Amino acid sequence: MKTFWIMPLLILVLFSCKKNSNDDIEKQEREFVPTDVLVKTAAGHSIDKVFDFINSLDHEVENIKCGYYNSSLSPDSLQYVLDYLNAKPYTNDGNMWYVSGYLHYQTNQITVFPKLFQIKNKEHQSDWLQSMEILQLTENSDNDVSGNIIFFHVPAGQEKEWVNKFKTYDFVEWAELNHYVDINPWP
C-alpha cells in the first residue's frame, strides 16, 4: 500500500520541478567580457566590404574569422598556399593559431581557413586582397555558414549599446556580447 502512494508522489515531485527554458536563460543577466562585441556578417558580404565596415568605425578589431576560401591552384600547391599565408604577420598569432587547410575530398580543391589579426591596419588589408589574387583564392560565400565574425573592442560600458547598433546594419546576421560561460568538466 505504501508504494501505491509513493509512486504518484514521486511523479508529482518530478513534474513539478521547473527547468529553465532557453528563453528564461536568455533573459537572465549574464556576465560578459568588458569591451568585447562579436559581429557576424551575412553570407555574400565580401571581405573587402568587411574592411570598409571596420575602417568606418573607431574600434579596435582583435581578429576576423574569415570563414573559408578555395584556391584554383593545382592540388599539389596546398603546402605552398599554407606557407605563403602563414608567413604573413597578420594571419597567425605567432603562438597557437595559423592558417590551416586541406584538399576537398570531392573536388580535390584547396580549401583554407584564415583568421586575420591586426587587420585594422590598411597595409595588411591591402596585402590580404593581393594575396587572394596571387593564390587565386575565392571566398566561399554561398551557404548558410558563410560570412565573417568580427571581434570588436568597443568602449567599456557601451557594449550593449554597440550590440544594438550593429544589429541595425542590413549585412549583420547577428551581434552579441562575449559572455562568460561556466564549464563543468564533471557532467
Image (cartoon, helix red, strand yellow):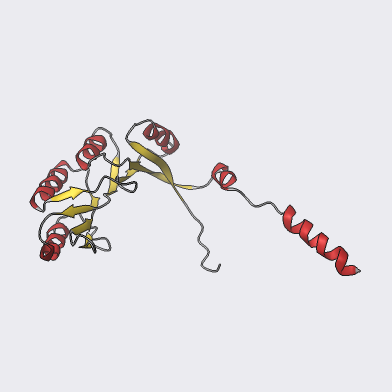
Q: Position of residue 163 (x, y in %)?
A: 41, 37
Place residue 76 in its image quadrant: bottom left
Q: Nearer the viewer, residue 152 or 20?
A: 20
In this picture, is 26 found above or below 187?
A: above
Q: Quadrant of the N terminus?
A: bottom right
Q: Position of residue 123 (x, y in %)?
A: 13, 44
Place residue 82 in its image quadrant: bottom left
Instruction: Residue at 32% x, 35% y: name it.
Output: 171
Q: Position of residue 145 (x, y in %)?
A: 33, 48
Left/right of residue 141 with respect to residue 122 in the rendered view = right
Instruction: Residue at 87% x, 66% y: name it.
Output: 4
Left/right of residue 62 with respect to residue 30 in the rendered view = left
Q: Position of residue 11 (x, y in %)?
A: 77, 59
Considering every residue shown, the one lying at the far front of the view is: 106
Q: Nearer the viewer, residue 180 or 172?
A: 172
Q: Nearer the viewer, residue 58 or 181?
A: 181
Considering every residue shown, the one lying at the far left of the view is: 134
Place residue 164 in its image quadrant: top left
Q: Quadrant of the C terminus?
A: bottom right
Question: How many numbered callouts?
Answer: 0
In this picture, is 184 found above or below 163?
A: below
